[in-house]
Image: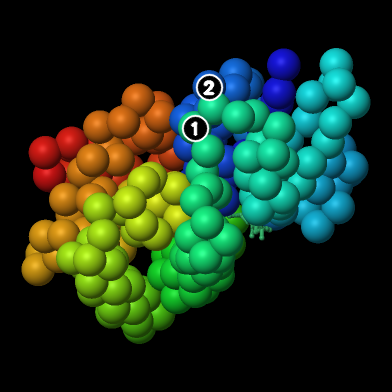
Amino acid sequence: MWQLHQFPLCPFSRKVRLLLSEKGVAYDLVRENPWERTEAFGKLSPAYRTPAIQNPERGVVLADSRAICEYFEETVDKTPMINGTAVNRAEIRRLVALFDENFYADVTLPLLEERMKKRLVYRSPPDSKRLRDSMRLADEHLYYIDYLIDNRPWLAGSTMSLADLAAAAQISVADYLGGIDWSGHEQARGWYSVFKSRPSFRPLLAERMDVIQPPSHYADVNA
Ligand SMILES: N[C@@H](CCC(=O)N[C@@H](CS)C(=O)NCC(=O)O)C(=O)O
């Protein structure tokens, strides 16, 4: 059985969970706080970052969400997530990079640091300017999703792909932390609400992080 080492508000862990569920791969969750940098976790993920996944029966250990997603894409035929022509696949990878790198740096990371880490780890108040900046940048990213969905049914083209999973994973964490204002983003909201009702997404939306509660619309599939 696969064991996914993750923490509930890690967007990269969420992307892997969505991919595993869409592909029908069974796994157990193991909670990690990567900032604690335990020796045991360092053996799985030498960079001390979630997610890492292992299968002791097969002797396989993988770290980094992109390496993990590519591994399952290559080894599990069901529900291809990096598919189509070489041009289609390049577009999927471009958008995965956009959400894993730019959205994370602009929006998810500042929210995680200001609203989660400062509360749980550093016990200091959030920086309100950094929070405002992250919400402004979230709005710009939502405009780009509106534009994509105006032109295609899914973010990278005609079928659901890893690009949709990467984007939905980042947005779900930002939304949990109160960083998303959906007003004026009907296309992005419609695309995201389709995700919210998928069986792969429901377990993520049901999870709660000890002392931090999400806004009321967070798990509401009609919101
Ligand atoms: N490129 C990596 C990024 C992973 C990453 O940055 N994970 C964060 C949590 S969301 C982490 O473990 N940070 C280390 C820390 O918080 O100390 C991936 O795709 O897996």
Considering depth in this image, is 183 or 99 the residue closer to the camera? 99
Quadrant the N terminus occupies: top right
Q: In the rendered image, which residue does mark 1 sit on? A: 79
Q: Nearer the viewer, residue 76 or 189?
A: 76
Closer to the camera in the image, 146 or 83:
83
Please say whether residue 164 is visible from this viewpoint. Answer: yes
Within-10-Å neighbours for mark 2: few <14, some 14–19, many 20+ = few
Residue 216's place in the image compared with 58, above or below, is below
How far apart in space, not on screen, are marks 2 and 1 (Cα)? Answer: 9 Å
Identified at 22% across, 66% down, the residue is 151
Q: Position of residue 13 (x, y in %)?
A: 57, 44
Q: Cβ–Cβ below 8 Å for labels 2 and 1? A: yes
Residue at the image point whose x is 78% and y is 30% from the top: 54
Q: Quadrant of ligand 1?
A: bottom right
Q: How many marks?
A: 2
Q: Which residue is mark 2?
A: 24
Q: Label 2: state its secondary structure.
A: loop
How are the colours assigned in the image? rainbow
Depth-wise, is mark 2 or mark 1 nearer the camera? Answer: 1
Q: Amino acid at mark 1?
A: Thr
Quarter of the picture containing the C terminus is: top left
Secondary structure of the residue carrying numbered label 1: loop
Measuring from the top left, give residue 185's x and y in whole percent. Answer: 15, 65
User: x, y percentage for residue 117?
Assistant: 53, 58
Disc 1 packing (10 Å; few <14; some 14–19; many ≥20): some
Q: Which residue corresponds to the image point at 57% horizontal and 61% vertical from the top-left?
A: 86
Residue 10's label in the rendered image is: none
Residue 16: give x, y in percent of width and height: 57, 41
Disc nearer the start of the sequence (2/1):
2
**Res. 203 image quadrant:** top left
Is there any visible trace of residue 15 in the rendered image?
Answer: no
In this image, 29 relative to 210: left or right? right
